[in-house]
Amino acid sequence: MQRYIGTVVRGIRTPIVKSGDNLVDIVVDSLEKALESENIKMRDKDVVAITESLVARAQNNYCSTDDIAKDINDKFSTEIGIVFPILSRNRFSTILRGIAKSGKKVHILFSYPSDEVGNSLMDPNLLYETKINPYTDVLEEKEYREIFGEEVKHEFTGIDYVRLYREILNDNCEIHFSNDPKTILNYTDEILIGSTHTRFNLKRMLKDSGGKVVLGLDDILNHSIDGSGYNEEFGLLGSNFASETRLKLFPRDGETFVNEVQKKLIEKYNKEIEVMIYGDGAFKDPIGKIWELADPVVSPAHTKGLAGTPNELKIKYIADTDLKDMDTEHATAAMKEKISHKNANLVGTDETLGTTPRRITDLLGSLCDLTSGSGDKGTPVVLIQGYFDNFATE
């Protein structure tokens, strides 16, 4: 029988998860209740995804601003230069409060007109009118205020991040604007990379250019401080605001967790089920220009069946070329035949023109992030069915 419905995505509600809860059982029980309530049957290759914040909370993977201050003082000796921090209360304000507690003077180097993920520091049109060259020109805070105003608010949050960060640091800071990361070396040779996705290149560049201490956020809280949470691989990257003095870190031991959930689901439903943890999706807002991915990865852990990239034909391309002279019935049959007998590796072939060249976990994670939302939907678990079906699936 032909399937008339393709991919279906459902947000699954769970109880409020607390530190120390058995999240494996909570996920399996919540999924069972949801399936029974809607008379849904599990199928082979269904995907169950759990948001990273739920995993980290159950693990009690938290740190305090005191923990951050201690690690900063252990790793830096003099003034600190923070290069290209993200503009975010959720992502960076508590980190900055921890740095402030270290007592060290801070130099902040902002990229402009926006940060790494697209949050704007200024109106790009106004920047163009000033004839400032963002590729070469260095601005100090006084010049920034004279040109762009005493209050420059983010379009969506209404926050003036330059003012906010200065207030968090109790004015024990200097603020600079440049797109050349080496500019920070004019002020200090002890540097903390604030960006996420460019951190490896920036570390190498600043070390080669004379940086005495060059670390990234992934090097802070990458081990426990007096019993605190930590993340060995990502440190403070992927962390989120829990309070003004407390951060929830990116989850640890994710592979163990997804494998345990998968084992229980397979035992329960006797189906080949895949499991993943997801964080931010990877997509760009066309209006606000914000690239959603502030986490270091979309999926910090997944079961083996979700590795790799899609291997898909582009139906639209083939319909307009190989099948353009066929009637609907014969074109449909021919398309199904092509899909059923496609090569195992279609990379570089014309038949893939227009397909999305991304990892399966990045595509699924983006889908999950949009489904669960970032507010009060209360669906931190997502069930995806039919994702691996195609036009030829019966």
Image (cartoon, rainbow, N blue to C red):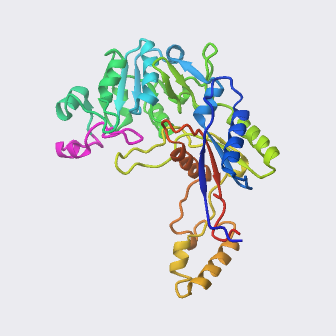
Question: Viewed as shown, does residue 369 lie left or right of 111?
Answer: right
Q: How many marks?
A: 0
Can you say which quadrant of the picture contains the C terminus? bottom right
Name the dominant secondary structure of the magenta segment.
loop
- Residue 253 location, x and y as percent? 69, 32
Residue drawn at (55%, 37%) of the image: 378
Q: In the rendered image, is residue 255 in sight?
A: no
User: Residue 380: which quarter of the image?
Assistant: top right
- Residue 118 location, x and y as percent? 38, 42
Magenta residues (range) = 112-136
Question: Viewed as shown, does residue 187 lie left or right of 377?
Answer: left
Q: Camera-side residue: 191 or 390?
A: 390
Residue drawn at (23%, 29%) of the image: 151
Question: Viewed as shown, does residue 338 lie left or right of 154?
Answer: right
Q: Is residue 127 magenta?
A: yes
Q: Camera-side residue: 204 or 272?
A: 272
Q: Is residue 188 magenta?
A: no
Can you say which quadrant of the picture contains the N terminus? bottom right
Q: In the rendered image, is residue 26 in sight?
A: yes
- Residue 173 location, x and y as percent? 33, 19
Residue drawn at (63%, 19%) of the image: 224
- Residue 63 location, x and y as percent? 56, 20
Q: Camera-side residue: 44 or 230?
A: 44
